[in-house]
Image (cartoon, rainbow, N blue to C red):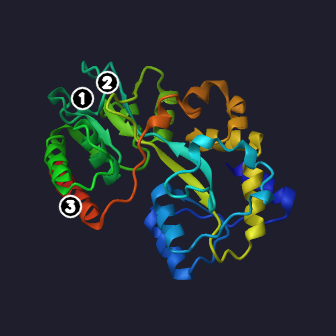
Amino acid sequence: PPEVLEGFEKETGYKINFSHFDYDEDMLAKLEETEGGDYDLVIADDYIIELVIAEGLSQKLDTAKLKNYKHYNPVFMSQFYDPKNEYTVPYAAGIPLIVYNPSLTDVEIKGYEDLWNPALEDNVALIANYRVINGITLKTMGESFNTNDLEVISKAGEKLLKLAPNVRVINDSNTQDFILSGEVAAGFFYSSQVVAAKLANQDLKIVHPKEGLGFGIMASFIPSKAPNAEAAYAFLDYINRPENAAKCYEYVGYYCANTAAEDLIAEEMRDFLVLPADAAAGEIIQNVSTEAEELHSEIWSKFRNECE
């Protein structure tokens, strides 16, 4: 949030040059181009960080420089992309969930499978992350998000095409607006969009799908040739002070990765931002084989075309 950025600048004298990237792949391309230079700190998604580390574009952290390191929730650590916690610290986590308006549909939604119900024809909004959407289709079949079995992925693709008649919109930004406007009765949204939707309309129902949760982590790392790594350490420690961390989570609308900040989050947002008990058992989407990735992409293109 602006007040956190401004507070850091005032306290330390460092000037922040802050930029966003639309896709993790754009960030990786930039790091590859500069060979790990230009940026002092990057916050990105789990799967792409695995590639960053493999390519030597991230430096090992000196955790002794992080006074607030003890506050990081261990649930978000020792993950597949950094099993020894050598390169990253967690920033936040997301769990895409189903949201629906019971006043606009008679369908009682309990899981991903219910989105295929013919009664929801032209009445569903989806985020535009193809691995997530292909993944929840796999989940309805009792399969893993991360299977490399091409036959299984193909069967999921066939099933996904049957969802197309129900899909009114596929959109990655502010997807919650479509359910808040009444344009759709149900949607599958990112965590921040779930929070925004529920805060705007308390009558909406949030569903933790019975087939299992998807679970993603955003983490911070210092690039291998960061021009000012000391500033990065200062910033990481500043935003991980409990009072600052609470402000950050309220602002971004993702799950809190700082145990000491949980009680400082506003009461009306705490249920949305403190990790639910079943989340730790969720499956994180990981990198798959080149062949599987290409098949996912092909399936998604066919699905998008079918939805138009």
Amino acid on which the number 3 mark rests in the picture? Glu
Amino acid at the residue labelled 1:
Asp
Left or right: 77 as drawn, with respect to 110? right
Q: CA distance from mark 2 to mark 1?
A: 7 Å
65 and 86: which one is in front?
Answer: 86
Q: Is residue 266 left or right of residue 25?
A: right
Pointer 1 and pointer 3: residues touching (CB < 8 Å)? no
- Residue type marked 2: Lys
Dot 2 lies on which element?
loop
x and y percentages locating residue 265 in the rendered image: 68, 32
Res. 128 visible in picture: no
Rendered location of residue 118, percent (x, y): 15, 29
Picture disc at residue 114: 1
Q: Badge 3: how crowded within 10 Å, few (<14), some, or many (20+)?
A: few
Q: Who comes first in sequence, dot 3 or dot 2?
A: 2
Is 163 displayed left or right of 190 in the figure? left
What is the crowding at mark 1: few (fewer than 14 residues within 10 Å), some, or many (at least 20)? Answer: some
Residue 225, placed above or below residue 199: below
| Residue at image coords 45%, 36% | 281
Residue at the disc numbered 2: 110
Considering only vertical position in the picture, is 214 above or below 278? below
Residue at horizontal 60 percent and vertical 70 percent from the top: 58
Q: Residue at x 25, y 43 (%)?
A: 138
Work out whether residue 112 or residue 10 is closer to the camera in this orientation and state it. 112
Q: Indicate whether 148 appears above or below 214.
A: below
Residue 71: horizontal and vertical position, in percent?
A: 72, 42
Q: Inspect this view and state whether residue 271 appears.
A: yes
Tag 2 near tag 1, CB within 8 Å? yes
Disc number for residue 225: none
Spatial separation of the CA atoms under disc 3 and disc 2: 29 Å
* Picture residue at 49% right of the left edge, 63% below the top: 50
Where residue 298 is drawn, which disc sits there?
3
